[in-house]
Image (cartoon, grey):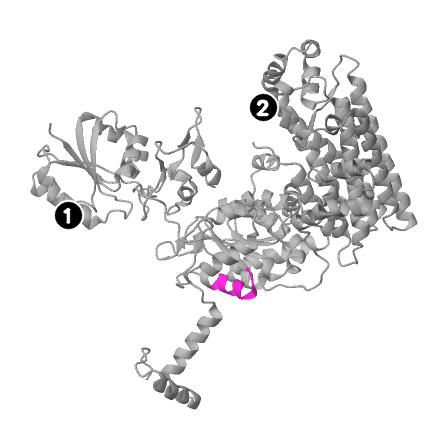
């Protein structure tokens, strides 16, 4: 991960104080230091390291403990959230090296040690007190199983015991999934007969705060709920089935797609509206309206791009004809506005929703227009122009979905502003990712379209305009051999690597914008959504 | 063709007990068989691999040590491959000393290849007949023991970085290609056979299938061998304490009841 790369250049103090008292002193010092900073989790890796560096400047005698201090800072930021999570959703992770290295009788399964409570080490005692509270516990061997668990996207809270090395390794994962977590370091890192401050664990485990102001949105549940909104019956109920045009539009709305937009909208709505009444009807209608706009644009796009397939089936204009497809697209736009008007929000919200929807529409058409006009001239786009098209074409999709969620849940202006910037960066990152997918899949190589806006192609075009020109001409002549050559050229020239770097930069930009958020529920959700939408590239 | 005998002393480990080594040495002496004692094959292979080139001086050799697959790959690491010299390998724990009478061996001279390093020579070797170079071990290891060479093969680059007694990377290997010769269990020690997975074999597969992680963990706990929680254990301890003291009348009464219920109570309390 890019953050780690930067990190490796700096060598941080890697020690742990060797007595519980010293450790406690340092913990208290860090707690005081962090308390007035009003830090909102999750913090990014670089942020934690920076704060730990600031701490060292003030307390230079603790220089050799910098990594530990970073862990403690992160602990402090998460702890208030951890306390609000029920015990039975918390997972205690212990390292196998706590066991007695020669006398341990326990067997090992895929996740780790199956403690037999022989009493030769402290594992038994720790997991027993944790399990009595309701915790799930795992005594893991190394970080493999832990990584798998953390990346499952289901883990809601982790209390992890381990060496600083293992924390360093799992930190990026827990940030990506924004998992509330507390790390308790081992005194040593020899991976054998380790020991840990038991008092600290005993202090940590029972912490509890029954306030309900934190909730972790179960994205899988929201996804299931969203699916029910697009059932045949529900769509028929809302839009009617009295004539064939309605039936075609309903069918098109019902089939295919990942329902990203409704999911984003509904999950944000729920994370803002924690513990408030949720108007399910209103939420459902607005979520469907976004999907209506989206599906309308797809029908029209497929005609404009002459794509004959969508969701592995004939595109709408292939199934019927272009005129019917155009008309269905228009009908879906009407559906969208109809649902906004029926959503039952107050007049102020209504005004905002209409402004957001129409602006999204406008941006999308401008972006699409830029792309279509480009086909009339043989020049390739510069990187900046490409990014501008991406920004117009893709960002509105996220922006409308997020802002709809925020407006419906009565989010404030500041939030809308943050969402706008977040969507802009996210949309560009998403489109670059899409671009790279096309280049990375062998099967797609023959389909590389030298006329489509693409960051990879733009980078090549800027490097060697003439060579690019000749590719464009060959492509226009219908020379199929140009595509694989273009692919090899892009690889050799480092254009793919450069595009990957840009993707990470925009991803980072989206994350940085979230630093302004004060509500951990929203910040956590937007971290998690980003992680799902921008899938990290294999290194 | 007379064979040269080598014997590993497992000096820095306990895979083969020192007694066992001594017993084999005296058996060889009794049969007037000359041999070379390699004090610690694992250690020498890393710290002084050139000393093992002596294997190449003999067309046929016999090597007494631990698992033959382990020794084969330790030797390969030191540059002694099965293709260049013929080495019969025997496990000192599994063979009967009587086999030496069948051997046609060189007589006389004894040699020692010393190993005097403090390092316990605990490290992995890779069985390249199994390894698929997937890199999981490299990914898993926190201490940069592994690296990928210029040809894309995963190699054990820094054996000294390996942490004593930790065989964890071997468990993550999908091909079971990693050998820790000094580990107590097969097949990680180089023995044949399947990796022993005790229970909930498909936990990882279940998690990958996106099943409810919390339910998977709860089921795993339930199927664990030790269902007793501490509070139950405490209860049991209290009951036992009650049984062995005569102070409480209630307990006396209970004891009476127990007596009546079960006259041959096994807990010695009656």
Rounded to the nearest whole Å, what is the CA distance between mark 1 and mark 2?
65 Å
Q: In which quarter of the image is the C terminus of chain A?
A: top right
**Nearest the camera: A184 or A472?**
A472
**Nearest the camera: A271 or B106?**
A271
On screen, residue A82 versus residue A230, left or right, reads: left
On screen, residue A193 versus residue B20, left or right, reads: right
On screen, residue A11 versus residue B247, left or right, reads: right
Residue A31 on the magenta segment? no
**Nearest the camera: A109 or A284?**
A284
Disc nearest the viewer among 1 and 2: 2
Residue A32, placed above or below residue A369: below
Residue A327, placed above or below residue A72: above
**Circle 1 — which element?**
helix
Q: Mark 1 points at which residue?
A: B23
Q: Mark 2 points at which residue?
A: A443
Tell me which secondary structure the magenta stretch mostly adopts.
helix
In the image, which residues are magenta? A125-135
Residue A316, placed above or below residue A156: above
On screen, residue A12 versus residue A253, left or right, reads: left
Figure label count: 2
Mark number, residue B127: none
Q: Position of residue A86 (x, y in %)?
A: 63, 61
The chain that hosts pointer 1 is: B
Q: Quadrant of residue A210?
A: bottom right
């Amino acid at each position: 991960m890019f953050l780690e790369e930067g990190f490796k250049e700096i060598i941080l103090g890697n020690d742990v104080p060797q007595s519980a008292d010293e450790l406690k002193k340092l913990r208290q010092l860090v707690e005081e230091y962090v308390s007035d900073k009003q830090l909102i989790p999750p913090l990014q890796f670089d942020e934690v390291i920076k704060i730990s560096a600031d701490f060292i400047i003030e307390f230079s005698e603790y220089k050799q403990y910098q990594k530990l201090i970073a862990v403690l800072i992160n602990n402090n930021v998460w702890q208030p959230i951890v306390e609000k999570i029920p015990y039975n959703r918390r997972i205690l992770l212990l390292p196998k090296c706590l066991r007695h290295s020669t006398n341990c009788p326990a067997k090992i399964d895929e996740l780790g040690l199956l403690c037999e409570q022989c009493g030769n080490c402290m594992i038994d005692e720790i997991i027993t007190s944790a399990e009595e509270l309701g915790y799930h516990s795992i005594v893991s061997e190394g970080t493999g199983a832990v990584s798998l668990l953390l990346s499952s996207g289901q883990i809601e809270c982790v209390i992890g015991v381990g060496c600083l090395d293992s924390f360093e390794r799992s930190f990026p994962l827990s940030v990506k999934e924004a998992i509330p977590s507390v790390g308790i370091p081992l005194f040593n890192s020899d991976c054998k007969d380790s020991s840990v401050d038991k008092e600290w664990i005993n202090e940590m485990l029972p912490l509890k705060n029954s306030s309900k102001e934190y909730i972790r949105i179960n994205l899988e549940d929201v996804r299931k709920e969203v699916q029910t909104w697009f059932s045949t019956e529900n769509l028929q109920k809302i839009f009617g089935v009295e004539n064939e045009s309605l039936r075609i539009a309903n069918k098109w709305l019902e089939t295919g797609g990942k329902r990203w937009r409704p999911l984003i909208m509904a999950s944000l709505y729920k994370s803002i509206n924690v513990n408030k009444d949720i108007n399910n009807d209103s939420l459902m209608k607005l979520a469907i309206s976004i999907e209506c706009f989206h599906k309308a644009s797809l029908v029209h796009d497929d005609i404009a791009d002459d794509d004959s397939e969508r969701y592995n089936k004939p595109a709408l204009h292939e199934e019927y004809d272009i005129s019917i497809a155009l008309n269905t697209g228009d009908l879906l736009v009407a559906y969208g506005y109809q649902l906004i008007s029926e959503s039952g929000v107050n007049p102020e919200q209504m005004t905002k929703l209409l402004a957001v929807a129409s602006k999204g529409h406008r941006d999308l058409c401008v972006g699409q227009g830029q792309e279509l006009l480009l086909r009339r001239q043989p020049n390739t786009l510069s990187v900046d122009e490409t990014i501008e098209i991406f920004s117009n074409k893709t960002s509105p999709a996220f922006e409308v979905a997020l802002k709809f969620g925020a407006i419906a849940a009565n989010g404030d202006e500041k939030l809308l502003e943050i969402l706008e910037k977040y969507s802009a960066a996210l949309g560009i990152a998403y489109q670059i990712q899409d671009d790279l997918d096309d280049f990375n899949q062998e099967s797609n190589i023959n389909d590389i379209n030298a006329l489509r806006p693409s960051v990879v192609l733009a980078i090549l075009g800027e490097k060697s305009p003439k060579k690019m020109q000749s590719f464009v001409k060959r492509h226009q002549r219908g020379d199929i051999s140009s595509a694989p050559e273009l692919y090899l050229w892009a690889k050799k020239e480092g254009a793919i690597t450069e595009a990957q770097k840009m993707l990470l930069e925009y991803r980072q930009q989206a994350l940085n914008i979230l630093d302004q958020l004060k509500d951990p529920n929203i910040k956590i959700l937007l971290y998690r959504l980003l992680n799902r939408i921008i899938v990290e590239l294999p290194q | 063709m007379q064979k040269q005998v080598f014997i590993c002393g497992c000096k820095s480990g306990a895979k083969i007990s020192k007694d066992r080594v001594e017993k084999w040495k005296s058996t060889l002496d009794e049969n007037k068989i000359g041999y070379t004692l390699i004090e610690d094959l694992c250690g020498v292979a890393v710290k002084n691999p050139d000393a093992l080139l002596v294997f190449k001086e003999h067309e046929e050799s016999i090597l007494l040590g631990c698992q033959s697959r382990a020794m084969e790959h330790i030797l390969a690491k030191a540059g002694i491959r099965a293709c260049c010299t013929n080495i019969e390998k025997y496990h000192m724990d599994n063979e009967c000393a009587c086999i030496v009478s069948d051997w046609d061996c060189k007589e006389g001279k004894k040699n020692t290849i010393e190993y005097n390093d403090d390092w316990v020579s605990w490290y992995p070797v890779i069985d390249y007949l199994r390894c698929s170079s997937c890199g999981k071990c490299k990914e898993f290891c926190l201490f940069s023991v592994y690296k990928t060479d210029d040809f894309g093969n995963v190699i054990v680059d820094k054996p000294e970085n390996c942490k004593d007694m930790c065989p964890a990377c071997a468990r993550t290997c999908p091909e079971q290609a990693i050998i820790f010769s000094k580990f107590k269990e097969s097949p990680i020690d180089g023995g044949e056979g399947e990796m022993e997975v005790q229970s909930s074999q498909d936990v990882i597969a279940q998690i990958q299938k996106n099943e409810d992680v919390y339910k998977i963990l709860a089921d795993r706990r339930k199927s664990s061998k030790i269902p007793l929680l501490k509070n139950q254990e405490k209860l049991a301890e209290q009951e036992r304490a009650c049984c062995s003291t005569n102070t409480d009348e209630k307990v006396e009464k209970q004891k009476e009841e127990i007596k009546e219920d079960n006259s041959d109570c096994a807990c010695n309390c009656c």
